[in-house]
Image (tube, rainbow, N blue to C red):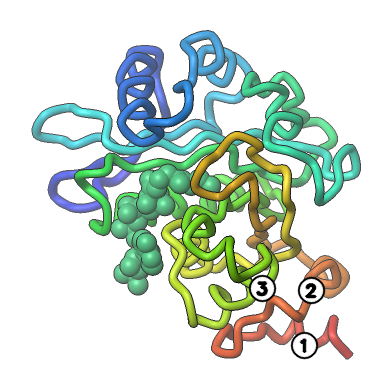
Amino acid sequence: MKPLTRSILVRNTRREDIEPIIQLCSAVYSNAPPWTAAQLESHLDLFPEGQFVAVELASGRVVGTAASLIVLWDDYDMQTSWREFTANGTFSNHDPDHGRTLYGAEVMVSPTLRGLGIGKALYQARRALTERLGLLRIRAGARLRGYHRYAAKLTPEAYVMKVVHGEIGDPTLSFQLGQGFHVLAVVQEYLRHDPESLGNAAVIEWINSLVAGPKDYTGRNLRFHAPAEPRSSRLLAAMV
Ligand SMILES: CC(C)(COP(=O)(O)OP(=O)(O)OC[C@H]1O[C@@H](n2cnc3c(N)ncnc32)[C@H](O)[C@@H]1OP(=O)(O)O)[C@@H](O)C(=O)NCCC(=O)NCCS
């Protein structure tokens, strides 16, 4: 894979990255236990192509990571929690024989290197993987990281509407909307113990237009459609 800039490379995760990912996770999520070595090893055993790290070339330091699995969406529903979508973080539910959905289980970037395009590069790698495998889409739960600041006055759904319409910036969802994702639903028990989202998440989707047909866009809730969001001709076709 090509370097993102002169200094950062995105590549598939290797066994030697496991300990650095655990350290990165501890720095990113101070209120939650980090990924365990057993979980990360399981990801590499089951779906090595789906695991990425961003590495600082000069130091060899892991500065970001994205972890994904393939799911058969019919086995789940919009209210499913992160724990169930990831089989307690093990990805033992990875189903490449039947699934057409890449499920984004994790993306994180070192707190000291945010805003430099590393998250974007990790998402580019995910989209390229989805296209290469001929999958229909990427779905994920975007934890509503800024929601705790608005919880006293807005429901999670009202908060998401304001983020989608650009009235509020959310550190996670605003980033993902910028990566071409669309909100499908708001769920309230996605990450039960997360003090920032208070458990709330937006189920988000990016569709692989190389393989999708008009019916694949019909699950989208147009209430969550940002006014400035480009509407593809396929989506317009699905709306009429
Ligand atoms: C979400 C996260 C991965 C973004 O990584 P990042 O490397 O800082 O993002 P990038 O620098 O690649 O930003 C890409 C784009 O998103 C935008 N963006 C990034 N953070 C943003 C924010 N807080 N608010 C609004 N937009 C944001 C950038 O401006 C950039 O836009 P551009 O393409 O128009 O220039 C990072 O903030 C993170 O690790 N968060 C903590 C972990 C987490 O919550 N992960 C998500 C779990 S659901």
Q: Which of the pair 84/61 is nearer the observer?
A: 84
Q: Earlier in the sequence, mark 2 or mark 3?
A: 3
Between the C-alphas of marks 2 and 3, the distance is: 14 Å
Q: Position of residue 83 (x, y in %)?
A: 70, 29
Q: Quadrant of the N terminus?
A: top left
In the depicted structure, whether residue 101 falls above or below residue 44: below
Residues marked 2 and 3 touching at CB (< 8 Å): no
Q: Quadrant of the C terminus?
A: bottom right
Q: Amino acid at mark 2?
A: Asn
| Label 3: which secondary element | helix
Q: Earlier in the sequence, mark 3 or mark 1?
A: 3
Q: Amino acid at mark 3?
A: Ala
Which residue is rendered at x = 64% and y = 19% of the image? 90
| Label 2: which secondary element | loop
Between the C-alphas of marks 3 and 1, the distance is: 25 Å
Q: Which of the pair 106/99 is nearer the observer?
A: 106
Between the C-alphas of marks 1 and 2, the distance is: 13 Å
Residues marked 1 and 2 touching at CB (< 8 Å): no
**Horizontally, is 128 left or right of 200 in the view?**
left
Which residue is rendered at x = 72% and y = 19% of the image? 92
Q: Mark 3 = which residue?
A: 158
Q: Position of residue 108 (x, y in %)?
A: 40, 41
Which residue is rendered at x = 35% and y = 36% of the image? 28
Crowd around label 2: few <14 · some 14–19 · many ≥20 (10 Å) = few
Q: Nearer the viewer, mark 3 or mark 1?
A: 3
Q: Mark 1 = which residue?
A: 236
Say the numbered circle drawn on residue 27.
none
**Horizontally, is 73 left or right of 158 in the view?**
right
* Residue 1 in sight here: yes
Which residue is rendered at x = 47% and y = 75% of the image? 168
| Label 1: which secondary element | helix
Q: Mark 2 = which residue?
A: 221
